[in-house]
Image: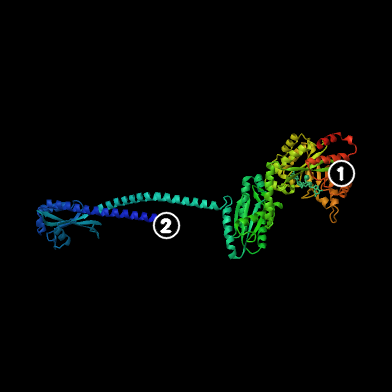
Amino acid sequence: MPMYRTIGAVVVLLLMLIAGTFTAVKLSTDYLLDNDATSTARNWARYVTENVKDLEEIAAGERPSAASMVFFRLAQNVGEVFRYEIFNRYGYSQFVSDRGKISPVDVSEYNTEAARSIATGQPIVNAKKGEGLEWPPFFAQAYVPVIVDQHSIAIVAAYVDQTAQRNQFYKTFLITAASLCALTGAAFGIPAFAWYRRTKEKQQVDRRVRFLAHHDVLTGLSNRARLVDKLGQALTELPARGCGLALHFIDLDRFKEVNDTFGHDGGDFLLKTIAERLRAVTRPGDVIARIGGDEFIALQTAIKSKDEADEFAHRLTSALTMPMQFNGQAIVPTMSVGVALAPADGDTSERLLKSADLALYRCKTDGRNCIRFFQPEMDAELLARIEIEKTIRKAVLHDGFELHYQPTFEIASRRLIGFEALIRLPAEDGTLIPPAVFIPVAEDIRLIDQIGAWVLREACRTAATWPPHLTVAVNLSPAQFKAGSVSAIVADALEQAGLAPHRLELEITESLLLGESESIMAQLRTLKKMGVAVVMDDFGTGNSSLSYLWRFPFDKIKIDRSFMLAFGESGHDAETVVKTIIALGRELHMHVTVEGVETSGQATFLDQVNADMVQGFYFGRPVPACDVGADILADFQRATAKDTFPLEAEAILRLIK
Ligand code: C2E
Ligand code: MG
Ligand code: MG
């Protein structure tokens, strides 16, 4: 039953109770007044009968005796009787006393009430309201038969002033009624009020629970359940409407970093601001939801073309990526947006969300901070990704990775100086998944730390078995620096393997320095202090900001293999750039290695331009640890003076055995 009807029913009930109480008290009062009048009149009549000896004579029309007159005068002041009349046995008035005037009546009048009282032998009482000044406001007129020897000899009519009683009764009645009403009101009202308050609170709690069941607490946007509901509804209405939908799946880039830098308050502030901006940029009818920590959805309804969705996605990102101020500091959010269109990319909520998620995944693999639309081939990519994730997890659990080693040569002497450890992930079918494919996935699923530590331990352990002049280079992913424990892991790997620190080279890429974090610089300095060489890998790609080279004293620069790929091609001046980087390295006292050397022509060129080291298929492909011995042996054989390398000879013999 709705609340207002319940309240109405309670009010009606209360009014009925009050009315009932008033009626009951009024009836009782009237009854009491009636009784009072009757008994007063009766008493007075008895008093008159007992004291007036010539009553029968008076009733017969004779003048009262002197004694009776004295009595009548006295009787005037008895009780509340302000007037009395004496009637004869036929109902005719004979004598009247009215406020000081006591006399036989001038003209005898017949009174029906008096006659009736005589006939029945019963008193008759009428309550009356006095009109005019000579009457009291409320009085009772009582006809009482005077019975002598069982015969009514006369009727005494007494007018009893009941104003005082009535006022007294009414006062009492009012107090009683008011108290009763108050009590009744309290008896019903207090529980009713308590019930009303409880119901109201319950309704509020219910409303809140219902709201929370469908909304995100922090931002007040719809939650996943409500989004799926609304999306399903919108999809079923599509055919009738003849238009389309676009589901924009928004993921904040590096939200964790915002949380780490600005604390949870900063993170919450960012999420709330994004929600506000979403509200501002969408139309009524569009649905906006927060479906995960940093994941939002904007459901754009009633669109006619993909262009509309594209235009909206751009409007969305430019609105959401505007800088915001938190505690005097600027937060500049970036985000990835995956877009799926309905009905083309899915006609159920589940499928459409999946399509948008796949498009979002593409954003992430494309470096984030971009918009991607769903493409049908993304399904297959997702399956492949799931497969890779599974293989990585298995390999982490069962030591399933392999390390291959690619030789590095000093170009001038053509002597082997070390190897770069390159990780491989064997797939179910025995093929090897290249690191470029699975390392980003391992970073994504946060297993890179474990894998990186394994690579370090394994590479150091293997290098410790090589001749002591050979180095080993290990690639480090930027994600490994986040925990701040790289130097400890490196120290541990060196110690366990018993490898001298100068034999280990750590390769990092420019992307590590992008954040310009002091913590990263500090970690690099610690590594260098430990005696480990720090190498800038893949130089010439990415941002290639020279400032990175000035900011940290790298031991070596490795020129990316893309320069060798472009070598000799007209239109590319790869040779000049390589020459310039080598010269720069000289100036900065950094060795320069050139990667991806595949031809003798490239090798000759690098020799001429004074590169320090080379690495590439021309000199040697990455091989499993067990085949490294062959490379070392070949190098040893190339060396002319065999006995100048006694240590190498011993080590090689050990390896070959
Ligand atoms: P990188 O450090 O620049 O390694 C050199 C890559 O170039 C290797 O690819 C190597 O096989 C390839 N390469 C070498 N010489 C030639 C050549 O003459 N021609 C061509 N076409 N390619 C050549 P790989 O092993 O697939 O590794 C790719 C990248 O994966 C590496 O690039 C490195 O950035 C990363 N990586 C490899 N191992 C690890 C690891 O243990 N940890 C991390 N974090 N990253 C790794
Ligand atoms: Mg490398
Ligand atoms: Mg490289």
Label 1 Cα crowd, 10 Å radius (few <14 / some 14-19 / many 20+): many
Give the position of the N terminus as an image quadrant: bottom left
For the question of whether residue 162 can be seen, the reply is: no
Nearer to us in this view, 116 or 607 = 607
Under circle 2, the secondary element is: helix
Looking at the rendered structure, the kind of residue marked 2 is Arg
> Mark 1 or mark 2, which is nearer the start of the sequence?
2
Q: Looking at the picture, does residue 37 appear above or below residue 591?
A: below
Under circle 1, the secondary element is: loop
Which mark lies nearer to you, 2 or 1? 1
User: Where ligand 2 lies, by image quadrant?
Assistant: top right
- Within 8 Å: ligand 1 and the Cβ of disc 2? no
- How far apart are the two marked residues, 2 and 1, measured between alpha carbons? 96 Å
Q: Looking at the picture, does residue 439 appear above or below residue 230?
A: above
Q: Position of residue 603 (x, y in %)?
A: 87, 47
Q: Residue at x 58, y 60 (%)?
A: 234
Residue corresponding to mark 2 = 5
- Image disc number at residue 411: 1
Give the position of the C terminus as an image quadrant: top right
Nearer to us in this view, 386 or 286 = 386
Looking at the rendered structure, the kind of residue marked 1 is Ile
Q: Position of residue 294 (x, y in %)?
A: 63, 50
Q: Residue at x 29, y 52 (%)?
A: 173
Q: Position of residue 47 (x, y in %)?
A: 15, 51
Left or right placement of residue 346 versus residue 406 in this view: left
Left or right placement of residue 19 versus residue 125 in this view: right
Left or right placement of residue 269 versus residue 533 in this view: left
Q: Are marks 2 and 1 in contact (CB under 8 Å)?
A: no
Nearer to us in this view, 215 or 466 = 466
For the question of whether residue 152 can be seen, the reply is: yes
